[in-house]
Amino acid sequence: MSDVPAVKAALKSQAVETPSWAYGNSGTRFKVFAQPGVPRSPQEKLDDAAQVHAFTGVAPTVALHIPWDTVEDYGALARYAKERGLRLGAVNANVFQDDDYKLGSVTHPDPAVRRKALDHLLECVDIMDATGSRDLKLWFSDGTNYPGQDDIAARQDRLAEALGAVYDRLGEDQRMLLEYKFFEPAFYTTDVPDWGTAYAHCLRLGPRAQVCVDTGHHAPGTNIEFIVALLLREGKLGAFDFNSRFYADDDLMVGAADPFQLFRIMYEVVRGGGLTSGVAFMLDQCHNIEPKIPAIIRSVMNVQEATAKALLVDRDALAAAQRSGDVLDANAVLMDAYNTDVRPLLAEVREELGIDPDPMAAYRASGWAERIVAERVGGEQAGWGA
């Protein structure tokens, strides 16, 4: 696609979901550096998310994490979001921070622990019913640290049983997104270590079970765009968790380490119809040393820039070069799009949306950062429990 009006229309329709936990205090496994003015409640997280949407124009939904975002009335929370121009997005389950889950959650050898974990997953579907959320996102830290610690195949059976029970509970318009991670905190076996394992379980479950690709959850050198292309081809790419990493799951701002990789991923998304097929573009980041809201705004902008470049690829020229076996020309077509400065184009898109062409400068000038530092005094700051 190289038609500028069509490119602009695609960019205006793209939506990036921001994570509630990124607005609170979060960081590494070793230290979380608290910042002044961070939210003290799910409502204040939504207040901050509304700022991101106001200045980018493309971040209308916010993912929840349970129990980090537990409230008494989820319907009221959904109304609170709507009043701020937002919707509640994916509900993320948490079966990795309770002491009972030391040996696993839904794959734990003890049936009582498995039942406790399953009850939490089903509770999250109840929350989706109340919030109107489409997606349930599941990530499991389950695994083993030592050979012989548990039966590898039996753990897959337990996992399949739990996923089946949750899938059966989903409403017709709801989806299950299964995330994977190849290591940590389980260092010998991980029960959902890669896209193939996630795909196999989703394939068995049915069409409303799809794979979530976290861009930081791969071994160094993994060709993530190949995974994206294959899952799109099979109709099983449900979502992204966008972040960036140098070594492992560092949860840095998306595009920070390798913006060319993000472009390559987004090209496969564009080519495979992922912009219009219901794929959710979500951020999953922990901002430890950088200010929260500006980091999220920058991440949204990075996704937009990669998408814009992907949309500018001359696909006819690329296809012609590929058919003729012209290796260098085919690569040059991609590089031409990647090397295009799309910031003026995106500035025009924002002006046409009625917002400031420079989201970062507009946020700095808004006074919101100073306001929340002054007003959010006392109480308990939101954090991820590390």
Image (cartoon, helix red, strand yellow):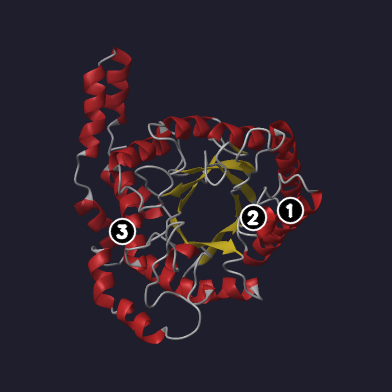
Badge 2 element: loop
The local crowd at label 2, few if under 14, some if 14 to 19, many if 20 or more residues have their Cα within 10 Å, is many
Q: In the picture, residue 67 is in which quadrant?
A: bottom right
Q: How far across and how far down the image is residue 184, in percent?
A: 52, 45
User: Where 6 sits versus 84, above or below?
Assistant: above
Residue highlighted by disc 3:
298
Residue highlighted by disc 2:
95
- Which residue is at the front of the view, 301 or 116? 116
Q: Is residue 240 left or right of residue 161?
A: left
Q: How far across and how far down the image is residue 197, in percent?
A: 60, 33
Amino acid type of disc 3?
A: Arg
Q: Residue shown at 35%/53% (left/top)?
A: 253
Badge 1 element: helix
Amino acid type of disc 2?
A: Val
Mark 1 / mark 2, whichever is N-terminal = 2
Residue that lies at the very extreme toward the top in this rendered image: 324
The local crowd at label 1, few if under 14, some if 14 to 19, many if 20 or more residues have their Cα within 10 Å, is many
Amino acid type of disc 1?
A: Leu
Q: Is residue 76 left or right of residue 26?
A: right
Disc 2 to disc 3, C-alpha distance: 30 Å
Q: How far across and how far down the image is residue 245, in percent?
A: 37, 46
Q: In the picture, residue 271 is in which quadrant?
A: top left
Q: Nearer the viewer, mark 2 or mark 3?
A: 2
Residue highlighted by disc 1:
118
Q: Residue shown at 78%/48% (left/top)?
A: 110
User: Where 307 sits versus 20, above or below?
Assistant: above
The local crowd at label 3, few if under 14, some if 14 to 19, many if 20 or more residues have their Cα within 10 Å, is some
- Which residue is at the front of the view, 21 or 182? 182
Q: Is residue 114 left or right of residue 346?
A: right
Mark 3 / mark 1, whichever is N-terminal = 1
Residue 127 - label: none
